Image (cartoon, helix red, strand yellow):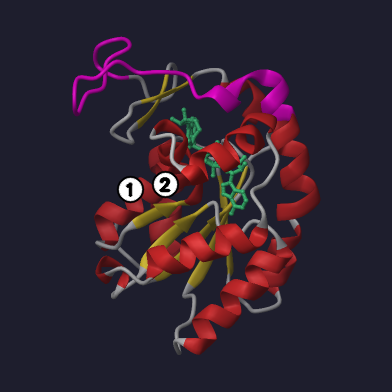
Amino acid sequence: MRLILLGPPGAGKGTQAALLSGALKVPHISTGDIFRSNIKRQTELGKMVSGILESGGLVPDDLTCKIVKDRLMKDDCHDGFILDGFPRTLPQAEMFEKMLDENNQRIDAVINITANDAVIVKRMSGRRMCSCGKVYHMVSHPPKKEGICDFCGSPLYIRDDDREETVISRLKTYHDQTSPLIGFYSRRGLIIEVDGDKPIKDTYEEIMAALGRKA
Ligand code: AP5
């Protein structure tokens, strides 16, 4: 199964991708996580992109596509993948389509998770992250012990780009550059639209039902 998760920042792409990855047994590939991990390790790539992420802008298309191409060549992607945060611009979508064609592959579905801007701005202030990759929310998905990851026991932290002014800038970037992808994939008959304002479990069940799978 090859899936793309589309949606504005904070719609729940990462949350749903993690659930779907467990159920469908294909890797969850988040370009945002790849960039953040490089920033944390202070790699050349990390140094190149840290200012971009901090400002809420987008990493250049060629660089992003190359990173995704390299990642998809790994063995664990043989039976499929779930892309979270890629593609994010029309040029990325076109380059990605070419990449898939060259490998005789196709996307099974593009899940568009909707959520309105006011919900997102409010929601982002409650997000808490763990370095192991788990994502929590102070209200909708809290850890058992405040500030501590349920899985690895590490302290949780707030993402640098979750400050309100950066969230507003990321939403503008989404509306200008990413939302046109809804039309791009609709024309290919691939879009499945789900409501990201519902409880996490309900959104997950809606996606699985649309994919014809049992949740
Ligand atoms: P990225 O990491 O992809 O960020 P994003 O797309 O802005 O999305 P988020 O991770 O913020 O949100 P999400 O939709 O995954 O929501 P989540 O599940 O965490 O990208 C970061 C940056 O990297 C970009 O700004 C850009 O600079 C760069 N970048 C990445 N990809 C790129 C590309 N292809 N090209 C160029 N640049 C790129 O949920 C959010 C919170 O809400 C959590 O706390 C969660 O617990 C909670 N929650 C989730 N669902 C619900 C629900 N249904 N109800 C209540 N709470 C919920």
Q: Which residue is drawn at 42% across and 46% down?
A: 16
- Residue 159 on image: x %, y %: 50, 24
**Relative to residue 139, is residue 133 depicted above or below?**
below
Q: Classify mark 1: helix, strand or loop.
A: helix
Amino acid type for the residue under numbered disc 2: Gln
> Magenta segment range?
143-168
- Circle 2 is placed at which residue position? 16
Which image quadrant: the N terminus? bottom left
Q: Nearer the viewer, residue 176 or 60?
A: 60
Task: Answer whether residue 145 is magenta in the image.
Answer: yes
Q: Nearer the viewer, residue 40 or 165?
A: 40
Q: Does the residue labelled 1 lie within 8 Å of ligand 1?
A: no
- Circle 1 is placed at which residue position? 19
Q: Which residue is drawn at 75% across and 43% down?
A: 173
Query: Can see residue 3?
Result: yes
Q: Quadrant of residue 89?
A: bottom right
- Residue 174 on image: x %, y %: 72, 45
Q: In which quarter of the image is residue 25?
A: bottom left
Crowd tier of the residue under label 2, counting other residues whose Cα lies within 10 Å: few below 14, some 14–19, many 20 or above: many
Q: Do the residues labelled 2 and 1 touch (CB within 8 Å)?
A: yes
Q: Which residue lies furthest to the front in this view?
A: 44
Dominant secondary structure, magenta: loop
The answer for how far apart the CA atoms under marks 2 and 1 are is 5 Å
Q: Which residue lies furthest to the top in this view?
A: 146
Q: Does the residue labelled 2 lie within 8 Å of ligand 1?
A: yes
Amino acid type for the residue under numbered disc 1: Leu
